[in-house]
Each structure stands twice: as structure tokens, then as C-alpha cells.
Image (cartoon, rainbow, N blue to C red):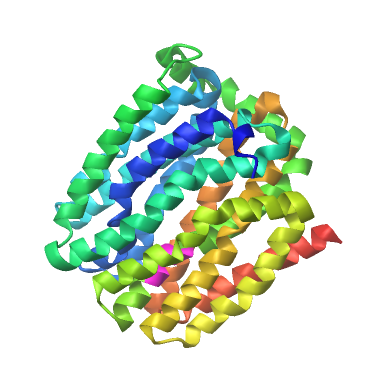
Amino acid sequence: MEIDRVPRIAKYLSLVFLVGWLGRSTVWNFLPIYFEQHMSVFLVGIATSIPALLTIMLDIPTGNLVQRAGEKVVIFLGLITAAFPPLFYYFAIPVMLVLGKISEGLCKAFIWNGSWSLSLKSSDDDVESETVSVFLLGVNLAVIIGPVIGGFLIASRGFSLTFGLWVFTSTLAVLIYLSYIGINTKESLVDSVEEVLHRKTYSDDWHHLKDNWKHLRLPFSLVFLYSIIFSFYWVAIPLLLDKVSGDFAVMGLIFGVAALPKAFQFIFGELADRIGQLKTIGLLSLFLTPVLVAMNFLSGTLVIGAFFFIARLLSSGMSPAIHAMFDSRVPDEVESEMVGFNELFKHSGQVIGPILAGTVSSIWSVNASFFAAGLISVIILGVTAYNLR
């Protein structure tokens, strides 16, 4: 990996996200179990999809805000917002849980639209996949370490302490961001917001999308389908493990180990650069499908953990190739706007994944929901095979 050629800004963002996501990751994987104590399984799926649903409405305006005000100030707004969800979750009543998910949605829209644009625009074309992998490394390390710590804390002290850690690390991330990156703007933030609200702005965006649709429909389709599977795990895996085990410490270890492949996404990034992005995605979906289908029949905690690790390994490997495909096909002059559309397709998938898991689980069983996830993997395989042909 050519680490010296990866932009410095991607490394700084990785550090910020490592700190900011660490406290969040101590409890985030366990939230469906926490929510289920206060609402039905079906509503858990609906609530988990709220952040993605909100970001669908915000992605295009946020992409425009990034284009006008600049990535750095938009990321800063997201980091500030990131401290609010645990404050709502602490009250443990349905309306507060919903408000927490709404604030998560605001955070996602600001942080990811700004961060993807900033890291990809600063990268050379021949190290795009490596840049994506380094940029995501901080988050990936946090989601490995956080659940292990959180599992033991929740088992011994309950959820409250982990909510406090979430607030603390989010605040610390803001301070690190200000120290290393800053919040300089291209235009006045107020003027930029006024432009974003102007009707002509969206007419221009849809015109740009139409002009580039032929080249971008494939990465948009793949990021949509990949995101269904990725977000499906958010609900299905915690509920399945709670059903067969109920031991938070064990669940935390499983979540941490299963997140390990995300820290090594750069390997899949290099593979995609070497053999091709479509071939990489197709091979991974080919192996992922039988793993997801097999999880319908599993009941042992360790066996479920092992299969979940394999599923996460295969699905995580798709992300660098999909995002690098998008970056290679979008013109630089409209990249910030098109990042907004890319995030829109991603979050559309993230709305469907949790609802899919919650709905199938409420009608049949948690195990049965993995058949549905396997079907999505088959569709990814079909899309890649068709485009390779």
C-alpha cells in the first residue's frame, strides 16, 4: 500500500473518526436490544431506519452545501451533532429514542457528505481505493474496539455509562478536528444555506445527474444494494445473538471480531485496483450468498459469530471497489454534488435493510430474515455478471 501517497487530510479524518466513533461503538450495536425493551421488533426495524430515511431528504441539500460552503464546515456541523443522540437515548422512552435516531440522521448527512467529498477530491486517481481505505480506517478500528469494551461495560454497569462515553468521545473528536483540520469556508455559511434553498440549485443538480447518469447508474445501483445488506446486520445480528445467548460480553466480542475485516479493507482496495472493481464485487457476492442463506439454520452462539465474521469479511470488501468505481466515473467539477446523490442511494438502501430485518423477524423469525439478505446478494451477483458480460 502506497501510504505516502495517501492525502494527509484522509489521515487526519481517520484520527478524528477513530476518537469520535469509539464511544459511540461501545453501545451502538446493542441499541436494537435496548430499543426492543421499549417497543416491538417491527418498530425496532422502523426506528433503526430513521437516520437513513432522514438523510435521504438531506443528502442533496447537504451535497450542495458542501459545494458552496466547503467540506470542512459541514463536517464540523456533523461532529457537533454527533454528541446529541446518547442524551436522548438515556431517557429510554419511545419518543426520545426516535429523537435520538433523528439526530443520528442529521449527523450522518453532514459528516459523510463532507468527508467523502473531501477525501476523494484530495486523492490521485491511481490511489483512490487506498485513500478510501485509510479514510475509513479510524471508524473501522473504533467499531472493532468499541463493542468489546461496551459488552463488558453493559454487562456490569448497564447502558448509562456507555451513553456517557459516547458524549465524551464525540466532544473530544470536535477538539481534535479543530486542531488538525479547522473549519474554513469557501463562502459564508449563511449565504450558502440561502443558495441551497434556492429552487434553481436543484434544477441544476438533476440536470448534472441526467448528464452523467449513463456512467453513474452502475455504482449507484451497487451502493444501494450493498447498503441493504450492510444495514440489515444492524438489526438482525443483535436480535439473533440476544435470542440465542443474551450475554452482552460475548456479544461484544462477536461484534468486535466481526468488525475486524473493515480494518483491512485496503487489501480489497488493492485487489480491486489489480483485477478490476466489478470482478472483485462479483466474486465477493458469489461467496457471500451461501453464507447468508446458511445463517437461517444456525442456533449456536459461536457458530453464528463465525458465520457473521465471514459475512462481514465478504460484504466489507465490496465498499472500496464500489466507491472507487463512483469516483473514477464522476467529473471533478460536479463531484461534490454527485457525492450527495451517491449518499442518497446508499441511505435508501440503509432504510430498507433494517425494515427488511424487522418485518421478516416479526412475521416469521430472525433466522428467516437471512434468506432475504441472501436474495439481495444474488441480485448484486447478477448486476455484476451482466455488466462484465
**Left or right relative to 207: residue 347:** left
The answer, for residue 31, to whether it is visible in the render is no
Q: Please, is residue 304 above or below residue 174 in the view?
A: below
Q: Could you say which is closer to the camera, residue 223 or residue 23?
A: 23
The answer, for residue 71, to whether it is visible in the render is yes
Residue 186, image x, y percentages: 51, 14
Q: Is residue 235 magenta?
A: yes
Residue 331, image x, y percentages: 73, 30
Q: Please, is residue 37 above or below residue 174 in the view?
A: below
Which span is picked out in magenta?
Answer: 232-237
Q: Residue at x 41, y 78 (%)?
A: 366
**Left or right relative to 334: residue 86:** left
Q: Could you say which is closer to the camera, residue 127 or residue 362?
A: 127
Q: Can you say which quadrant of the picture contains the C terminus? A: bottom right
Q: Please, is residue 329 above or below residue 185 in the view?
A: below
Residue 141, image x, y percentages: 42, 51
Q: Can you say which quadrant of the picture contains the N terminus? A: top right
Residue 209, image x, y percentages: 69, 35
Q: Is residue 249 magenta?
A: no
Report the residue that reaches farthest toward the right.
389
Please tell me how many numbered marks the rendered image carries.
0
Q: Please, is residue 44 above or below residue 266 in the view?
A: below
Q: Could you say which is closer to the camera, residue 249 or residue 326?
A: 249
**Left or right relative to 170: residue 376:** right
Q: Residue at x 50, y 81 (%)?
A: 295
Rendering quarter of residue 386? bottom right
Q: Residue at x 35, y 56 (%)?
A: 145
Rendering quarter of residue 205? top right
Q: Could you say which is closer to the camera, residue 192 or residue 141?
A: 141
Which secondary structure dominates the residues rendered in magenta? helix
Q: Residue at x 34, y 61 (%)?
A: 29
